[in-house]
Amino acid sequence: MEKIIVKPVWFDSLGAKSSCTLVETPDARILIDPGIAAMQPSFPASAAKKQEWREDGRKAIKKASKEADIIIISHYHYDHYFPTDFSIYKNKVVFAKKPNEYINDSQRARADSFYSRICEIYGKTTLESLSLEKTKEKAKEMKNKYPDPLADLPISRHKDFGDYNKRRSELFDKGSKWFAGRVANWAKNPVIPELDFPLLKLKYPEGEEFKFGDTTLRFSKPLFHGIEFSRVGWVFYTIVEHENEKFIHSSDLNGPIIEDYAQQIIHENPQVLILDGPMTYMFGYLLSRINLNRAVENAAEIVRSIDAELIIYDHHLPRERKFRERTEKVWSTAKEANKKLMTAAEFLGHKPVVLSVVEKKRKSF
C-alpha cells in the first residue's frame, strides 16, 4: 500500500505480549491497542529477561504514542491498553471498547478504574457525577435489547462436529445462562458515558464508522474473544481505509476460532492484515484440539481467499516454540498461494524471540 503505512510497534514475537500497531495515512496517525504484558511463566526465558522485553516494549509504545492523534483500545486486557500510564492519551481521540455492554465482569471493573482516573486527570471531575443521569435513562433501553448471540453466527451454529455435537450443545446452554447473567449485570451497572474533555475525547465505536479527511475508520460489532460465549469477553476489530487501500487489525479473535468471523475478514479482503492466532501455549488446557483445528482451518481459508500483499500472523502464537508446527497448515497454505505471511519480528528483520531463545539454549549444551 502507498497511502496506508502499517508499522508494528510491539508483538509477542518480540518477547512480550502485545499487538500494538501504528497506522499512518495522509489524514490520521492511529495507534491500535497500546498495551503490553510480560510473558507467562512457561515461556522459556528468565523472569528478568521477560521484564526487560516488557520494558523495551513499553518504551516503544510510549514513543509511538507521541506520533499518534488517535488511539484505539479493542478491549481491557493489559496487553491492549495502558491502565495506569495516562500520559499517552493526552490530546488524543480515543476509540475504546464500550464498557457498558458486551463485556465480562473483570474487564468492566478495569474500565471503571480506568475511566475514573481519566475523569479526574482530564476532566477534573468524577465518573460518578457524569454517570448519574445516563444510568437513570438506561433501564428502559435495556429491556429486550440483547438477542441470542448465536443468531449472528449461522456458520458456527450449524457446523457439524460429529460426536462432539452433544457436548457443544451443552456448552452453548451453559453459555446462554452465563450471557443472561452478564446482561443482568449490564442493566445494574452505572453507565460510563462517552467523554469530551479539552485534552481527551472518548468514543465507543463498535459497529460504527468515522471519517478523518479521506481516511475512514470502521469497527466491527462486539465479537467473542475466542470461542462462542468465551468467558474472557468481547473485542472489536479495526478497519482503516483510504481510497482503494484497506488494512485490518483483528485484535483477539484467537484464530479466528469462529467461522463467521473468518468470513467477515474474507469479505473485507484487506491488502494488509494483522491476524492474531490461537493460544497454542494453552493447548490441552484452555485450547482443545477441536478449537485449534477450527482456528487453523479458518486462518488457512483467510490466507487462501484474500488478496493480501502482507499478513502478519502473530499475538498469542509465538508464546511457545511449537507454534509453527501446531499451525503448519496456515504457513503451508501461504507458501502454496504465494502469500507473504510472517510474524511481526520477521517483518522487522528478526527471528521470533521464542525460537531464538530455544536455539541459544540448545547451543549452550
Image (spheres, grey):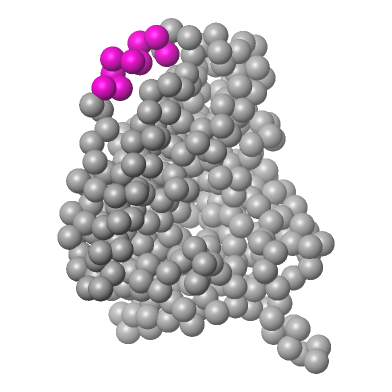
Please name whichever residue, 284 or 202, is drawn nearer the observer in this view of the structure.
Answer: 284
Q: Quadrant of residue 180?
A: top left
- Which quadrant would residue 123 be assigned to in this image? top right
If the image is split into quadrants, where does the N terminus sit?
A: bottom left
Quarter where residue 363 is shown: bottom right
Name which residue lies at 49% across and 13% down: 131
- Please tell me which residue is depicted at 58% across the width and 54% down the height of the picture: 18
Where residue 335 sits: x, y (%)? 37, 83
Q: Provide residue 156's location: percent of width, then percent of height.
A: 24, 59
From the viewer's side, name the closer residue of 71 and 15: 15
Q: Which residues are magenta?
A: 135-143
Task: Pick the quarter of the image with the C terminus.
Answer: bottom right
* Res 216 seen here: no
In the rendered image, residue 139 lying in the magenta stretch gets the answer yes
Classify 57 as above or below 129: below
Residue 136's place in the image compared with 80, above or below, is: above
73 drawn magenta:
no
Please state if 195 lies on the left or on the right of 140 as rendered.
right
Residue name at image x 40 percent, y 74 percent: 289
Figure check: 114 above or below 121: below
Drawn side of residue 173 relative to residue 364, left or right: left
Query: What's the magenta bit mostly, secondary-structure-wise?
Result: helix
Which of these two is toward me, 8 or 276?
Answer: 276
6 or 78: which is nearer to us?
78
| Percent of width and height locating residue 174 | 34, 49
| Rendered residue at 72%/48% (across/down) | 59
Count of numbered circles in the view: 0
Residue 31 coordinates in the image, percent (x, y): 53, 43
Q: Is residue 138 visible?
A: yes
